[in-house]
Amino acid sequence: MERRTFKTFGLFATAALITAFSACQNKDAKTTETKKTDSTTAVSADEKIVFVNSDSLLTKYDYYKDLKVKFESKSKSAQADMQAKTQAFQREVAQYQQTAGSLAADVRKSTEERLGRKQQELQTYQQNAGGALQNEQAAENEKLYDKVATYLKGYAKEKGYKMVLTYSKGNSAILFADESLDVTSEVIKGLNADYTKK
């Protein structure tokens, strides 16, 4: 359950970041030429398109790291709670099975019905707990998206960039980009500075 939760969380976060980065496109009708630079120089003001490595951003953005720790803790707690409830139910079923032969038919029937209801309640509880955790993650992903998008809009405006693309190894529309266009470190530094202010 925990691995699936975090895989889902990672996919949501990555999708949120990809959307955030592409949302920073300035809808200016002017076309601009990009000037080639060697990878040791910084991005010049003439270059209006830059990219951020979303893998690095996720591993180095303090807000995301804090979210990950928070949801690991919540997931472990929910898993432990569910395991305790399941074990208690299994003990009750085992106890019934040991005494079932000596019980009257009507007592057996009512006990089996009660255990059936308990099992359904347990399944409903598990579904509701999982749904509540997913809803909370979705809300946090929305906040993550908003933080990154807001920062990148301001960053792009300040630097004069027309577009901020995202790059993720094995899952990217960018097949090649000169390293001089990579502004990941600068963006991470700015995002972390904003996060520590709050």
Image (cartoon, rainbow, N blue to C red):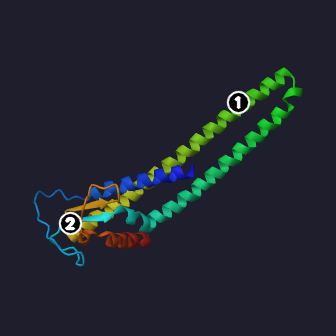
Indicate the amino acid at tag 2. Tyr
Picture coordinates of residue 152, whole percent (x, y) = 30, 64
- Callout 1, which amino acid? Gly
Judge whether 19 appears above or below 113 on screen: below
Q: Between 106 and 54, which is closer to the camera in this rendering?
A: 54
Q: Which quadrant would residue 59 be assigned to in this image?
A: bottom left
User: What residue appears at the point 81 percent right and 33 percent down from the top-left corner?
Assistant: 96
- Residue 149 location in percent, x, y? 32, 60
Up-down relation of residue 110 to residue 128 (above or below): above
Find residue 116 and name its label: 1
Image quarter in which the C terminus is found: bottom left
Precedes in sequence: disc 2 or disc 1: 1
Position of residue 8 relative to residue 122, above or below, is below
Q: Secondary structure at mark 1?
A: helix
Near mark 1 (Cα within 10 A), the count class, few <14, some 14-19 or many ≥20, is few
Q: Which residue is mark 2?
A: 161
Q: Which mark is residue 68?
A: none
What residue is rendered at 45% in x and 63% in y?
A: 64
**Residue neighbourhood size for the residue with mark 2, other residues' Cα within 10 Å, grouped as few (<14), some (14–19), many (≥20):** many
Q: Is residue 33 left or right of residue 198?
A: left
Vertical order, 26 against 192 (above or below): above
Q: Residue at x 53, y 49 (%)?
A: 133
Q: Residues under labels 2 and 1: Cα distance?
A: 62 Å
Residues at badges 2 and 1 in contact (C-beta under 8 Å)? no
Quarter of image, res 26: bottom left
Given residues 140 and 170, the one toward you in this image is 170
Q: From the top left corner, tell me how far across and down residue 40 is, in percent.
A: 24, 78
Q: Nearer the viewer, residue 54 or 175?
A: 175
| SS state under label 2 | loop
Residue 20 in picture, x, y percent from top left: 32, 57
